[in-house]
Image (tube, grey):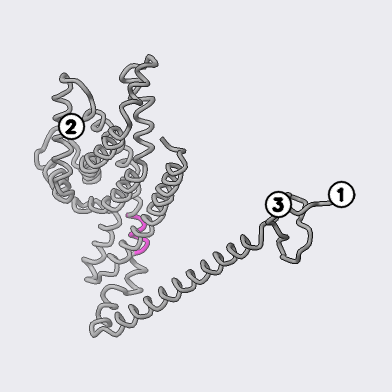
Amino acid sequence: MTVVKEEPGREDADGDGGTPDADDGYVPSRRRLDRERYKRDRARRATAVAALSTLVTAVVLYLVVVNAPGWPRTKETFFSAEYAREAFPKVLEGLWLNVRLLLICGVAVLVLGMLIAIARTLRGPVFFPLRALAAAYTDFFRGLPLIINLMIVVLGVPALRLQGVTVDPVLLGGTALTLTYSAYVAEVFRAGIESVHPSQRAAARSLGLTNRQALRHVVLPQAVRRQVPPLLNDLVSLQKDTGLVSIGGAVDAVRAADIIVGRSLNYTPYIVAGLVFVALTIPMTRFTDWVTARMDRQRAQGGTT
């Protein structure tokens, strides 16, 4: 007969003083069980308080809004169910253009931004003109408001009547978005490259790698991995700003809503378009938050260099 000895300081899970379970050889102490139970109770109380406070806040805001003197007129102008049903399918049809712009411009922005960042970090006096041009590019397009850039490109380029140059507002609008956002993304990449310690490059060179190989295989992988969260934030902003191409006449989600508003003088389609963009943006925003939290945990555990 085998006798299972209870280790000092440990008790059985149910607290009845019996022998511990022999399946895993470990039984948490009563103090630990009480501590975990307290944590669960505190988490439940916090969740209940948060839900109650949210409900109270929502009710108060609802009462304030619906009891406002101009609420009936506002409801009719901005929250008409009839115009929402009419606008929704057309806004969704126009949203496909915004999604395509996001995918194409997103890739172009990442590539161009990376090239500009590399140009700004090149060493040696021979590369000074390239560094100066890259710095001037980022300073100019980061300082120029996006809406003005869109107007210049979308409206100004066709006015030049250049042979072989497109006048398609979608292509011109995508070009303006790429010019502006590549300047922001270039600075994100440059910050990532400069955050890599010089010893990494020196170690790569000591192993026989050329400067180009050290940049490609050692510096850039670390730089990009560190800058994933801000890059995703820039893509979220790009996703929203694709709606600005409508100023050139491109029929995207915003323009589709604008056409209905111009005919009906009811602004509900704008609300529909706004909610569609929010629904498109929220998943990417939450994904960005998840990636940021995951990388923070890895960094805290020493899993990311």
Residue 177: in sight, yes or no?
A: yes
| Above or below for 206 versus 11 | above
Give the residue furthest to the left: 160
Tell me which amino acid carries mark 3. Tyr
Instruction: First in sequence, mark 1 or 2: give its number.
Output: 1
Tell me the tag on residue 26.
3
| Above or below for 84 versus 133 | below
| Above or below for 234 versus 261 | above
Tell me the tag on residue 106.
none
Tell me which amino acid carries mark 1. Thr
Give the residue furthest to the top: 208
- From the image, which quarter does the C terminus lie in? top left
Which residue: 59% across, 66% down? Answer: 37
**Distance Cα–Cα, label 3 vs label 2:** 62 Å
Instruction: First in sequence, mark 3 or 2: give its number.
Output: 3
Q: Is residue 234 left or right of residue 132?
A: right
Find the magenta span and give its range: 88-94
In front of the other: 235 or 119: 119
**Distance Cα–Cα, label 1 vs label 2:** 78 Å
Which residue: 11% across, 43% down? Answer: 156
Tell me which amino acid carries mark 2. Ala
Name the residue beneath numbered marker 2: 134
**For numbered disc 2, what is the local secondary structure?**
helix
Name the residue beneath numbered marker 1: 2
Q: At which x and y percent is residue 124?
A: 19, 20
Q: At which x and y percent is residue 135?
A: 16, 34
In front of the other: 245 or 131: 131
Q: Is residue 132 magenta?
A: no
Q: Nearer the viewer, mark 1 or mark 2?
A: 1
